[in-house]
Amino acid sequence: VIVLSAKTDYVARTTQLRQLIQAIPRENKAVLKRLCGLWKKLLANSDENQLLLEDLVDAFGPGLVKHFGSQGSLEIAKIIIGRSDELF
């Protein structure tokens, strides 16, 4: 089990997430990358579909981050969903 500190700054948290993603099995990483690509498309069309980053985090965050709901886990889910280009 790897724990990301809720008090870690954005750059450090992004670096930690990138390292974690590189460590997961190839198949899991491919699925996560594909999901991130779909979420990115949804966000790119938010004017039309009325979906905001917060909506996607609310919908998919619990499946991405264990103990979802704390401020740190919300930020981690936002990075995964909203800034996936920085992670892969």
Image (cartoon, rainbow, N blue to C red):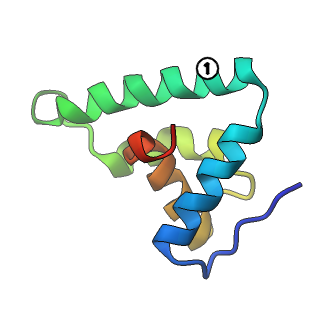
Which image quarter holds the N terminus? bottom right
- Residue 80 location in percent, x, y? 50, 46
Residue 26 vs 16, above or below: the answer is above
- Name the residue at the bottom extreme: 7
- Residue 3 location in percent, x, y? 78, 64
Kindly identify the residue that appears in the image at 19 percent across and 28 percent down: 49
Q: Quadrant of residue 68?
A: bottom right
Residue in front for this viewpoint, 48 or 86: 86
Q: Residues within 10 Å of mark 1 (few under 14, many from 20)?
A: few
Q: How many numbered marks are there?
A: 1
Q: Quadrant of residue 85?
A: top left
Kindly identify the residue that appears in the image at 33 percent across and 32 percent down: 40
Query: Of the residues shown, which amino acid type is indicated by label 1?
Result: Ala
Kindly identify the residue that appears in the image at 28 percent across and 25 percent down: 41
User: Left or right of 88: which side holds 5?
Assistant: right
Q: Which residue is mark 1?
A: 30
- Name the residue at the right extreme: 1
- Residue 64 location in percent, x, y? 64, 42
Q: Secondary structure at mark 1?
A: helix
- Residue 72 location in percent, x, y? 59, 70
Kindly identify the residue that appears in the image at 47 percent across and 70 percent down: 10
Residue in front for this viewpoint, 58 or 79: 79
Residue in front for this viewpoint, 29 or 42: 29
Residue 27 vs 32, above or below: the answer is above
- Name the residue at the left extreme: 47
Residue 34 vs 59, above or below: the answer is above
User: Left or right of 43: which side holds 68?
Assistant: right
